[in-house]
Image (cartoon, rainbow, N blue to C red):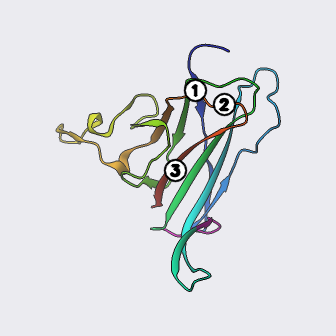
Amino acid sequence: MKKGKTVIAAAVATLLASSALYAAANTDVAAPKAGQGCISLKTVAETEQEVVNEKGERVKRLAPAAKVVPGSEVVWTVTASNVCAAPAGNVFIDNPVPEHMSYVSNSAMGPGAEIAFSLDGRRFAAPEQLRVRDADGTERAARADEYTHIRWSFRNAIAPGQMALARFRATLK
């Protein structure tokens, strides 16, 4: 097993046309090809919809995001699967907030992961450490809608055949 970091860029490919958002997801692979890592990523875009369950109760469920209009909130889920025979340690997922979307404050989650944010895709930190300089030169705390990237750093190795989950919400501008 290699020591060091496994950094994965979970590039969310989006196409914005006619106020509709379509997501392209990576497909899982059975085994890595030469030169590829042990982690396979799959990205899914969903929206919350209210439905009536079998008991007649109104509940919220996630459904594929086929069409999203400005102001709509999308739930982005990245699944990282270990496709190798050995545990994958020091796994990081770096994911951009999709273009034309704003990150929803406090929505990032990932069981067993530490979460950091970036304003430029290079430097990651906790929200309270992110600062921006306004046009007049004053410095202030960055707002969640200014985050451009999210990083999930998984504390534990991902076992062979197992997966880790990273999720966040973003609103279409």
- In the rendered structure, the answer to whether residue 113 lies left or right of residue 146 reads right
- Which residue carries the number 2 mark? 159
- At horizontal 30% and vertical 48% (from top left) the residue drawn is 143
Quadrant holding the C terminus: bottom left
Q: What element carries label 3?
A: loop
Does the magenta segment cover residue 158? Answer: no
What kind of residue is marked 1?
Val
| Distance between mark 3 and mark 2 Cα atoms | 33 Å
- Position of residue 158 measured from the top left corner of the image (x, y, whole percent): 62, 31
Residue range corresponding to the magenta coloring: 62-70
- In the rendered structure, the answer to whether residue 16 lies left or right of residue 33 reads left
- At horizontal 60% and vertical 13% (from top left) the residue drawn is 3
Disc 2 crowd rating (10 Å Cα; few below 14, some 14-19, many 20+) is some
Q: Check residue 80 in the rendering and tell me which mark sits there, or answer none.
A: none
What kind of residue is marked 2?
Ala
Q: In which quarter of the image is residue 157?
A: top right
- Position of residue 48 measured from the top left corner of the image (x, y, whole percent): 53, 68
Q: What element carries label 1?
A: strand
Number of marks drawn: 3
- Which residue carries the number 3 mark? 99
Q: Which residue is outermost to the front?
A: 55
- At horizontal 48% and vertical 36% (from top left) the residue drawn is 113
- Which residue carries the number 1 mark? 7
Q: Nearer the viewer, mark 1 or mark 2?
A: 2
Q: What element carries label 2?
A: loop
Q: Nearer the viewer, mark 3 or mark 2?
A: 2
Quadrant holding the N terminus: top right
- Position of residue 125 measured from the top left corner of the image (x, y, whole percent): 36, 32
- Residues 86 and 34: in front is 86
Q: Is the magenta stretch mostly helix, strand or loop?
A: loop
Q: Nearer the viewer, mark 1 or mark 3?
A: 1
| Distance between mark 1 and mark 3 Cα atoms | 22 Å
